[in-house]
């Protein structure tokens, strides 16, 4: 029962929360479900069930005179099992320019959105891991972030992340912005984290919806590790909290390469802040192209 308001606030209200119940159409429901239908099939199933329950109740109470907008939505979206598709990822050479845009002040953006995306890129974490981060997970003196197993999805084991100097700066800014908040990146609703669609919207507003996804920045990091930094694969896999598919090898390889990863995350942060580009780059706010060029940091 507690999951009802959580799922509705996360996936439904940001898109159709202000639409009168009698004016919601199937297109609205498709907009809610399309981003999660394949990536989060079980969540999508529960969201659809709860939306259907709302409209069945509205029809019974007479507040909606039309048929349920959920009719035919599942068939329109198609079977949940499909060929695996990789998330579009920004080429790592483009990340420094994009990062420079994120760091520019913007009166249009919610104050925690752009720092959250930068933090996600710098830590190579998933959207929910960053958005739902709480202060109790951080040891700022040791520059370590421990994501508990309850928040680590299918891996179901804690993930220890060394955080770079730039990440510590972001955390200090967020604490100054919302000193009483439980969440590091508080959303528009008091006491709640940023919504699932907030970071996606930032990329969409930049005109990058077809070129990059939030989750794809993990691939940008992985490719940079392999091609530019030449770090050992085991180290980059540990940074991404990937579990070795070879169960025998995984059973014996118990190290998390923490010391190596401390250096790795600093090098990644330095690269992301370097802005060593001379070609036009998309601005995160408007999608307009502009030239960024600066000296290495």
Image: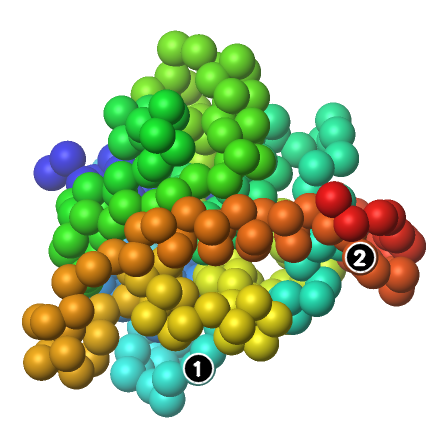
Q: Quadrant of the N terminus?
A: top left
Locate the C terminus and report the quarter of the image it occupies.
Answer: top right
Q: Is residue 239 left or right of residue 119?
A: left
Q: Residue at x 56, y 54 (%)?
A: 268
Residue 296's place in the image compared with 169, above or below, is below
Q: Is residue 64 above or below residue 223?
A: above
Is 149 in front, or is 65? 149
Q: Earlier in the sequence, mark 1 or mark 2?
A: 1
**Left or right of 149, for residue 202:** right
Which disc number belongs to residue 154? Answer: none
Residue on which the image places disc 1: 85
- Tell me which corner region of the image, top left, top right, bottom left or bottom right, holds residue 105: top right
Q: Where is residue 117 shown, x and y percent of the image?
A: 55, 45
Q: Nearer the viewer, residue 207 or 9?
A: 207
Relative depth, front residue between 288 and 267: 267
The quarter holding residue 169 reads: top right
113 and 245: which is toward the camera: 245
Q: Which residue is mark 2?
A: 276
Vertical arrangement, residue 215 with respect to residue 73, above or below: above
Q: How is the image coloured?
A: rainbow
Residue at disc 1, secondary structure: loop
**Position in image of residue 137 (x %, y %):** 28, 31
């Amino acid at each position: 029962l507690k999951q009802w308001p959580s799922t509705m606030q996360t996936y439904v209200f940001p898109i159709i929360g202000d639409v009168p119940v009698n004016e919601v159409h199937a297109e609205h429901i498709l907009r809610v479900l399309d981003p999660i239908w394949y990536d989060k099939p079980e969540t999508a199933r529960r969201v659809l069930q709860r939306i259907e329950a709302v409209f069945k109740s509205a029809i019974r109470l007479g507040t909606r005179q039309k048929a349920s907008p959920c009719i035919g939505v599942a068939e329109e979206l198609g079977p949940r099992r499909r060929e695996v598709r990789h998330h579009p990822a920004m080429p790592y050479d483009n990340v420094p320019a994009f990062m420079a845009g994120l760091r520019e002040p913007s009166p249009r953006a919610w104050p925690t959105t752009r720092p959250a995306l930068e933090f996600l890129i710098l830590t190579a974490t998933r959207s929910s891991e960053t958005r739902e981060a709480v202060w109790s997970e951080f040891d700022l003196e040791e520059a370590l972030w421990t994501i508990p197993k309850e928040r680590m999805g299918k891996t179901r084991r804690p993930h220890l992340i060394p955080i770079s100097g730039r990440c510590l700066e972001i955390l200090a800014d967020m604490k100054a912005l919302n000193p009483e908040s439980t969440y590091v990146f508080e959303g528009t609703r008091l006491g709640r984290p940023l919504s699932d669609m907030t970071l996606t919207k930032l990329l969409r507003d930049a005109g990058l919806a077809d070129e990059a996804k939030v989750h794809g920045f993990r691939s940008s990091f992985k490719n940079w590790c392999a091609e530019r930094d030449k770090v050992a694969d085991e180290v980059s896999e540990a940074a991404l909290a990937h579990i070795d598919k070879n169960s025998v090898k995984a059973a014996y390889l118990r190290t998390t390469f923490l010391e190596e990863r401390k250096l790795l995350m600093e090098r990644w942060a330095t690269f992301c802040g370097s802005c060593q580009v001379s070609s036009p780059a998309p601005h995160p706010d408007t999608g307009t192209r502009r030239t960024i060029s600066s000296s290495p940091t």
